[in-house]
Image (tube, rainbow, N blue to C red):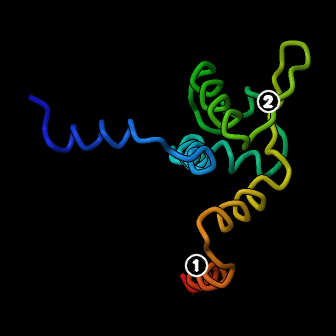
Amino acid sequence: MPSPAHFRGTVAAIVDQPDDLRELRVFHKALADVNRLRIVRRLAEGPATIGDLIDTVGLSQPLVSWHVARLKAAGVVETKRTGREVFCQLRPNVFDEVAERQRILLGVSGTADAAAERLVEAH
């Protein structure tokens, strides 16, 4: 017999979820993995090949490619194939765009962001 928590989770998954919020969820889930965050941090320095990313994160080529695919599906990364090489880069302004869209969708004002930045700077 399923637990009450399992039942609640199943019911929650059935409930119609707004597409705009689902879009935010995909973005945040893509960044909810340490290896993908390490890839993003490397790409913040500039474009890189899959081989460069393998050297950075120390994972196998299939795993790095899988992580890059998750980031690409979330709109964080762009890729371009040149011969056998796949070049990756962060999508320009992606974090600013998502932050603004998130503020609008969630009804959060920019003043909370300023307070959060001060908190981060203090630590």
Q: Mark 1 or mark 2: which comes first in sequence?
A: 2
**x and y percent of residue 90 in the render?**
79, 45
Looking at the picture, tell me which residue is in the foreground, 110 or 41.
110
Q: Quadrant of residue 26?
A: top right
Q: Nearer the viewer, mark 1 or mark 2?
A: 1
Separation of disc 1 and disc 2 at Cα?
Answer: 32 Å
The quarter of the image holding the N terminus is top left
Q: Which residue is mark 2?
A: 49
Farthest front residue in view: 16
Secondary structure category for the residue under label 2? strand
Residue that appears at 68% across and 33% down = 73
Q: Is residue 67 left or right of residue 15?
A: right
**x and y percent of residue 10 in the render?**
30, 36
**x and y percent of residue 17 in the render?**
50, 44
Amino acid at the residue labelled 2: Thr
Question: Where 98 falls versus 61 (above or below)?
Answer: below
Counting labels gives: 2
Farthest right residue in view: 82
Q: Which residue is mark 1?
A: 120
The quarter of the image holding the C terminus is bottom right
Q: Quadrant of residue 58?
A: top right
Q: Is residue 120 left or right of residue 5?
A: right
Q: Are discs 1 and 2 less than 8 Å apart at CB?
A: no
Q: Quadrant of residue 68?
A: top right
Residue that appears at 60% across and 85% down = 115
Residue that appears at 30% across and 39% down = 11
Secondary structure category for the residue under label 1? helix
Looking at the picture, tell me which residue is in the foreground, 54 or 1.
1
Farthest left residue in view: 1
Looking at the picture, tell me which residue is in the foreground, 71 or 16.
16
